[in-house]
Amino acid sequence: GEDVEQSLFLSVREGDSSVINCTYTDSSSTYLYWYKQEPGAGLQLLTYIFSNMDMKQDQRLTVLLNKKDKHLSLRIADTQTGDSAIYFCLDTGRRALTFGSGTRLQVQP
Amino acid sequence: NAGVTQTPKFQVLKTGQSMTLQCAQDMNHNSMYWYRQDPGMGLRLIYYSASEGTTDKGEVPNGYNVSRLNKREFSLRLESAAPSQTSVYFCAMKELAGGNEQFFGPGTRLTVL
């Protein structure tokens, strides 16, 4: 079945760049998404990329997609303390929405 | 989360009680999903419905039943709640055209004592 994997934890210093990685297995994926979840809150859509794109930039966010390796990454430039949260990648393959387990980003002042 | 409603937002149950979580959408999506989210576990799929009248089990269906009576509504029922079902429940939907759409309901925080 479909599977989406993420590393569980990332710690960076304020002002540095953060890179959160995700791998997926469903070759029928059309859109891949990044969601942010702050403590006690719901899921907030951050950005997405269509499967025929390699890169998408949206202000401080850059999404890179390597379709051959089924690898997705989210780069946050100039990371701020307000970026501390859990980040989920979401694969919208044929069968179901499949989430990664989430990467907890900790930003140290 | 315009177009997607979940009720209730919060609920406390005693072990053995039953309840139904409601989800409704007005975005005309075919596929609807129920997820639970536990700390450190990410989101896990309970059940999904590819279209009106059909339902399928997800990763963690035990202890739950679902009903897709029409295109708009997809309900999740706990017949006999257990403390292990304490979680946050999200309803979600998918549109094949996809893109910049918010998929999720606001969530239901359920505590089973």
Image: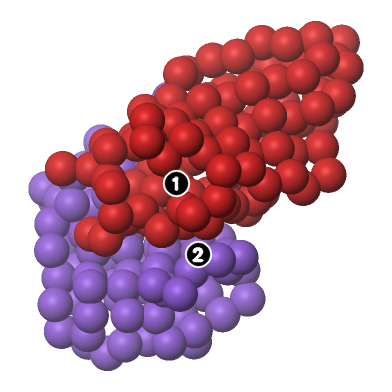
Chain colours: A red, B purple
* Residue A83 position in % (x across, y down): 76, 30
Front one among B59 and B20: B59
- The image shows residue B48, relative to residue B53, as above or below, that is above
Between B107 and B53, the one nearer to me in the picture: B53
The label number, if any, that marks residue A90 in the structure image? 1
- Indicate which label's residue lies in the foreground, 1 or 2: 1
The residue located at (34%, 47%) in the rendering is A98
- Amino acid at circle 2: Phe
- Identify the chain of the residue marked 1, using the numbered disc in the image: A
Q: From what the image shows, is residue B99 above or below residue B90?
A: below
Instruction: Name above or below for residue B2 compared with residue B89.
Output: below
Residue at 83%, 44% in the rendered image: A59
In the rendered structure, the residue with mark 2 lies on which chain?
B
Q: Note whether residue B73 is visible.
A: no
What element does badge 1 sit on?
A: strand
Q: Answer with left or right where residue B23 lies relative to residue A11.
A: left
Give coordinates of residue B70: x percent, y percent: 27, 90
Quadrant of the snapshot with the C terminus of chain B? top left
Q: Which mark is residue B92?
A: none
Q: Do labels 1 and 2 share a chain?
A: no
Q: Where is residue B17 in the image (x, y as percent from the top left)?
A: 22, 56
Q: Which residue is drawn at 50% across and 64% down?
A: B103
Question: Does residue A11 appear anywhere in the picture?
Answer: yes
Disc 2 secondary structure class: loop
Q: Which is more toward the observer, A97 or B14?
A: A97
The label shown at residue B103 is: 2
**A26 left or right of A33 in image:** left
C-beta proximity under 8 Å, tags 1 and 2: yes
What residue lies at 15% left-to-right and 70% top-to-bottom? B55
